[in-house]
Amino acid sequence: MSTRKHKRKAVVKHANKNMSSKYAAKHPSLFSKYPRIFFYLGALLIVTGIYLLIIGMQNNAKVGLAMLSIFAGTATVIFANSALPKKAIKE
């Protein structure tokens, strides 16, 4: 009799695992909610980084800040581009 009880508990635990994955799918990230805003923000970071790189060639701190801005902007653009819908939605 204890064997059947153990089997029932295992099935219930398995069902709870499926429920948690369903709830996790309902909470999208900011990238998937607003991909165009993050795309433009990343492009702005890249442009700012290039501007700082051109203007601040004499100062090492500005060059470092420019490189960080370019890397962060590139990563943001890549993530936002992957979150953009593939087909245009007709309104």
Image (cartoon, rainbow, N blue to C red):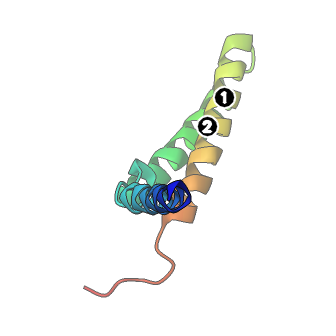
Q: Is residue 82 visible?
A: yes
Percent position of residue 50, x then y: 65, 37
Residue 47, above or below 78 = above
Disc 1 residue type (three-letter): Leu
Residue identified by numbered label 1? 68
For this view, does 56 lie left or right of residue 11?
A: right
Taking the spot 68% from the left edge, 12% from the top edge, the residue there is 61
Disc 2 residue type (three-letter): Ala
Label annotation for residue 72: 2
Graded by Cα atoms within 10 Å as few (under 14), some (14 to 19) or many (20 or more), the crowding at tag 1 reads some
Graded by Cα atoms within 10 Å as few (under 14), some (14 to 19) or many (20 or more), the crowding at tag 2 reads some
Percent position of residue 37, x then y: 39, 53
Taking the spot 62% from the left edge, 27% from the top edge, the residue there is 52
Q: Is residue 34 visible?
A: no
Residue 47, above or below 86 = above
Q: Secondary structure at mark 1?
A: helix
Taking the spot 46% from the left edge, 62% from the top edge, the residue there is 8
Point out the residue furthest to the bottom here. 90
Residue 49, above or below 29 = above
Q: Secondary structure at mark 2?
A: helix
For this view, does 13 lie left or right of residue 65?
A: left
Determine which quarter of the picture holds residue 70: top right
Determine which quarter of the picture holds residue 55: top right
Count how many numbered circles sit on residues in the image.
Answer: 2
Percent position of residue 87, x then y: 47, 84
Tag 1 near tag 2, CB within 8 Å: yes
